[in-house]
Amino acid sequence: MSKPKVFVTRAIRDHGLDLVKEFCDAEIWPDELPPSCEVLLEKVRGMDGLLCMLTDRIDAELLDAAGPGLKVVSNHAVGFDNIVVPDATVRGIPVGNTPGILTDATADFAFALLMAAARRVTEAERYVRAGQWKTWDPSILLGSDFVGATLGLVGFGRIGRAVARRASGFEMRVIYFDPGASPELGLNAGPVDSLDELLRQSDFVSLHVPLTPETHHLVNADFLNKMKSNAVLVNTSRGSVVDQDALFAALKNKQIFAAALDVTDPEPLPLDSPLLRLENCIIAPHIASASEKTRNDMAVLAAKNLIAGLKGERLPHCVNPEVYGH
Ligand code: DGY
């Protein structure tokens, strides 16, 4: 019997790729850069399954280009704002994602960014390499303390909670704003009633919300105005949750102390972005989940979602379970 045909939009880690190849007749996009929209439209034609990245836009046009045989879309990410999910749902196509397994790696990196921004690690490293380190100095590169400081989490899902656990090891006070979240016993974190209240109290603000029309540019001039002048902003969610022009102004005018972004809009951030000229802004290339184990596990879960969809089984992690009708 012939194997189902799938297109994989980037070489994922072998742990997952081997599973895909065992079960499917797979075409794997070989380039470092993602396929363009035009190429993707071409490549999906006649496919039974698609394993895609957060860099691929999946919408009605693409699903129609694939044709009626497409049984599953498996996203190699927990976030799925690159997919117009209702377009898949109306066609009865389940969409898979990779929640849970990247929680710790992402929380670790959010905390690494928080510490690096507060203690000016990247700035200090540039200072040394530029030959500016003349002697021990009581007053250079002073940063912020963690013990007793308040960390405000915008969003209290899996990753927000994992960041809260790390913060308690640093004896920080943790508050969160997430109207939909249930409190978690054993976590030393308390809810606040409004975002304004969170911003008024927080020395560190870390974003853990999905990108939706409601969270697009959630961090705007008004949000930044309400932050404390010593505050550090960390974003490991999605770039367009932050209005980068407003952030640039707030950082340049020292309205807030620093920001650290793992995600930007667009990605990659153009080299002429003014944010790259600021000493108090750290930019990383969307690598919060980039630990060896996590990326292997993501590849395996994305492969399992794909294969389950091809077999007509329920996906281990499906973002649109309504396609199953129960
Ligand atoms: C995700 O999975 O959504 C991250 O942004 C990349 O790992």
Image (cartoon, grey):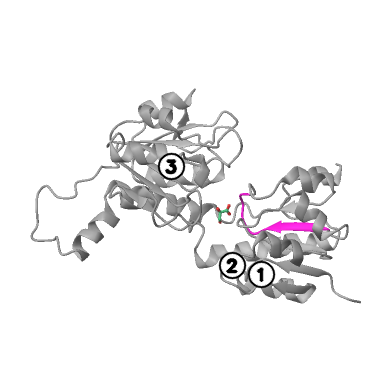
The quarter of the picture where residue 206 lies is: top left
Tell me which segment is drawn in magenta: 71-79
Tag 2: residue type?
Answer: Asn
Residue nearer the viewer, 7 or 318: 7
Tag 1: residue type?
Answer: Gly
Percent x, y of residue 246: 40, 36
Percent x, y of residue 144: 25, 42
Magenta-drawn stretch contains 73: yes
Ligand 1, by image quadrant, is bottom right
The quarter of the picture where residue 233 lies is: top left
Of the 4 image quadrants, the one containing the C terminus is top right
Residue nearer the viewer, 119 or 59: 59
Q: Is residue 200 visible?
A: yes
Residue nearer the viewer, 318 or 216: 216
Q: Secondary structure at mark 1?
A: helix
Q: Residue at x 39, y 39 (%)?
A: 247
**Left or right position of 8 against 276:** right
Structural crowding at the residue carrying mark 2, measured as other residues with C-alpha within 10 Å and reported as few (<14), some (14–19) or many (≥20): some
Distance between the alpha carbons at the discs numbered 3 and 2: 32 Å
Percent x, y of residue 307: 78, 64
Residue at the spot of label 3: 244
Residue at mark 2: C-beta within 8 A of ligand 1: no
**Left or right position of 165 against 324:** left
Q: Secondary structure at mark 2?
A: helix
Residue at the spot of label 2: 296
| Circle number at residue 16 | 1
| Circle number at residue 119 | none
